[in-house]
Amino acid sequence: MLRSSRMFYVVISTLLMTSALKAQVVEPKSYDCYRTNTPLRVDGKLDDPAWRDAPWTTDFVDIEDSTKPTPRFRTRTKILWDDDYLYIGAELEEPEVKATLTRHDSVIFHDNDFEMFLKPLADASGYFEFEINAQNTSWDLYLNKPYRQGGKADSSWDIPGLKTAVNIQGTLNDPSDKDSGWTVEIAIPWNSFASRLNVTKPEIGSEWRVNFSRVEWKAGQPKEDNWVWSPQGVVNMHVPERWGHLVFQESRRSGVHSQPHTPVR
């Protein structure tokens, strides 16, 4: 009996160690963010010519890693920049588009939502979070450090000059028909970060850490699904060192860009 118990604990310990090691080897993804020479019209449609030059990210996967079940609905993102804004466009497949929250700085992930996490400075502990639902209701907040390190969410950070728009391919909050999904377009001014961090407009070759998340609720399911661009290895978005790499490049049409980027672990 003693030997059986000992073997049981050995097996459990091995499984836990294997799981922990697996979480540590998730390689952050990288995205080349190209400059646009033409300001974008933020209407949620993603049909500006500049978006055609921006590559899609890979499809979102489970927050832990791609070995988990494939998300039920496709999600992907594009990113551009110019002298004034960081632009984010997202496409969310959704057969029933719904959202109830209409007050700014609500806890948006109580609805199905799209989220962005952005850490401009590698040597600073602080970072920014932005969430938006299909009602075009948003929550912008700053964290001085991750929650696990005692970080505090600061919802008093608002993005001056923020532009957002949502376009619904279907009808909002109408379960009688089948929708295709929704797209969202976001423009964040560079100077909006300065009230919390000493952040300036990036240069060609600059690298920030970024990740994108989608929270999706399913009827009868007590917990939400978390789908992300760059897997975290754990069910926790607030681990910035596991976010992807956002590398700022010159316009694709200029033919000039920095050397191919290899993420540094």
Image (cartoon, grey):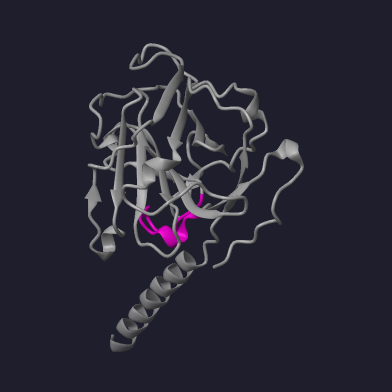
Is 109 rendered above or below residue 137?
A: below
* Foreground of the two, 164 or 24: 164
The quarter of the picture where residue 141 lies is top left
- Position of 104 with respect to 125 (left or right) is left
- Position of 29 with respect to 170 (left or right) is right
Q: Number of numbered discs present?
A: 0
Residue lying at 38% horizontally and 81% vertically, measured from the top left: 10
Where residue 168 appears, as percent x and y from the top left, is 45, 18
Is 63 rendered above or below residue 44?
A: below
Where residue 46 appears, as percent x and y from the top left, is 55, 24
Residue at the extreme right: 255
Residue 7 is covered by the magenta coloring = no
Which residues are drawn in magenta? Answer: 230-244
Residue 175 visible in this rendered orientation of the protein? yes
Quarter of the image with the C terminus is bottom right
* Foreground of the two, 56 or 93: 56
Is 240 rendered above or below residue 22?
A: above
